Amino acid sequence: MERNIAVLVGEVTKRFPGPGGKLDAEVVAVDHVTLRIRDGEFFSLLGPSGCGKTTTLRMIAGFEHPTAGEIYIHGKPMGLTPPYQRNTNMVFQSYALFPHMTVARNVGFGLEMKKIPKSEIARRVQEALEMVRLPHFGPRKPNQLSGGQRQRIALARALVNRPEVLLLDEPLGALDLKLRKEMQIELKTLQREVGITFVYVTHDQEEALTMSDRIAVMHHGEVLQVGSPTEIYERPTRRFVADFIGDTNFLEGVVEQQQGDLVTVVVDGTLPVVTQSEQAVSPGTQVTVAVRPEKIRLLPNPSRGEYNSFPVQVKQVVYVGTDTRFRVRLSDNVTLAVRAQNLLSTADPDAYYGDSNTETYAVWLNDAGRILLD
Amino acid sequence: MSASTTTNEKRGLLNFIRRRPGLQTLVLIFPSLFWLVVFFAVPLLIVFVYSFLKRGPYGQIVWEFNLGNYARFFDPLYLKIFARSFKIAGLTTFFCFLFGYPMAYWLATRPAKWRNTLLLVLMIPFWTNFLVRTYAWILILRDTGLINNALMSLGLISQPLPLFGNDFAIIVGLVYGWFPDMVLPCYAAIERLDFSLVEAAQDLYANEARSFLRVIFPLTLPGVVAGVMLVFIPSLGAYVTPDLLGGAKSVMIGNVIQSQFLTVRDYPFGSAFSFVLMAIMLVATLIYFRVGARTA
């Protein structure tokens, strides 16, 4: 086993009994999940609610135990080790600050339980409060803090113990958008500084893309794809991943031929879409090609060379501030979503992009499209 | 015609009240205010005045102000009864907590759809009349009762165990009688507890015992204190239970007050005794509010 793996989730399955303990109504929350989380990395579990991401996190923390499989933290099998004997700490979605203790007592709780000398606790608590930029908040009670401040105290309470792994369960979920964006950057910076492995659970794809070194996309208890934010976004391998993260056009078609890593897929019987694929696909296979709306440009003339270029009819133009969104018709059965950044400051996008009567071409690079496995 | 005039007059009266918020409040609280004054404040005042008067030779009231009734309270005989009452009420409260808190914890951590049913099951025995339930304990505890008969016929004991007519019997009866009053407030507090706090404690290296002592118990303390008050106060002033289960030797404050009013017919002394008891309860209640304010 690699030495630099902080958490190894090995073939873990978690089943919960159905209502009333009925075995036939069992829920499989996590299904044969394997994850190798590297030491010092910011790793996100991303997926919609009920995908098993929180259950996976809770199993790493020790609040739940796997039905099958094993979790290793720095090579040690965790088995039924209770949370209080694991060198992991968790930042809860609700923060879970003890309401009857001051901020300082909250932050020092873990150290106190570990029977660290009082003077050292005081010093480390102060350091932790300074780290989250709330140095004077020690004597306050949690109910005297704002949401953002509670969030930071929860972070300080976990980090002060210098855990091997820090687990974060949607910690920014309760904050408003602006504060959340600030905290995303702050969390990432903090993680770099302390160098502790972060395992971060979120359903917010943008949050995961912003902060993570690597992301595991989960759905129905399974891990669909693991990769860096760019890999996940630019090279999704599964339909769900492409759909869940960002917007995507799905073009269904049949493989015509493969030349090197370029595959030609005939979409809707007539449109030869060229796309890149690292793996061999035999002609005649039904596949889906995914193309991001922002990779497609609308031009007045067709482009040749490494481009896909098709005449289209513009059906809809929606101005959304930063971008303009188009719906264009590629063929009778296929429409595309196209997004163009508003580089020019004109009030009338039609002046640049034409209306439905002007000849328009949808153009995208051959390597912009991805062939999906399902 | 006359009917419409009365309606108008009525409307006039209603409008008259509506336009005066102060009067409106007075009209609304009048029934309860009347009740409180006539049946609570006035009798209490009478008792208070009596407590400073004297008993005549035939049990009548002699209008002569004195503090003798309160001084008599310090008679070793009565102090002993007071001390015994405190001991019995204290032990009753302690055992109610000892059995009631785990029970409340168990109830509050059941699936939500079962909780109300289980609470109902807990309450059902208490729908039976209090006297009947206390009599039942006589049949269980007395020398020829259920327990002693069973143990003797099994040959485990040759003499009946002293289960009846003593402090033990009173405590059994009181614990039984006030048990739900401990369970319910504890249950309410535990049910409100955010269990992610318990997980947080365990995540921060506190084992089960420490997360109980440092998080669960302090956060449910207001419920415990409410339960303690609800059990301790009526136990301290208990009258029926010691009367039926305690026998002649185990007398409590309640029995003294009862005998002063009904047997000895020393109304002033009974009144003074009642006021001492009330003062103690008032102090206990104030402590409760202070604890409640601190934890909230």
Image (cartoon, rainbow, N blue to C red):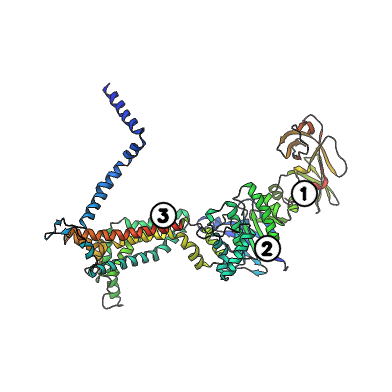
Q: Amino acid at mark 1?
A: Ile
Would residue A207 be found to the left or right of residue B274 on screen?
right
Residue B53: x and y in percent read 18, 57
- Kindly report the distance in space between the C-alpha atoms of the residues bearing marks 3 and 1: 57 Å
Indicate left or right for B127 with B113 as reference.
left
Within 10 Å of the Cα at label 3, are there few (<14), some (14-19), or many (20+) other Cα atoms? few
Determine the chain carrying the residue at label 3.
B
Q: Quadrant of the N terminus of chain B?
A: top left
Q: Which residue is mark 1?
A: A371
Q: Nearer the viewer, residue A271 or B230?
A: B230
Badge 3 vs badge 2, beta-carbon distance below 8 Å? no
Task: For the residues labelled 2 and 1, say whether their Cβ atoms are less than 8 Å apart.
Answer: no
**Label located before the other in sequence (2 or 1):** 2
Query: Going 48% across and 62% down the picture, which residue do you hit?
Result: B216
- 2 and 1 marks on the same chain: yes
**For residue A247, which quarter of the picture?**
top right
Relative to A298, residue B149 above or below: below
Label ID, residue B117:
3
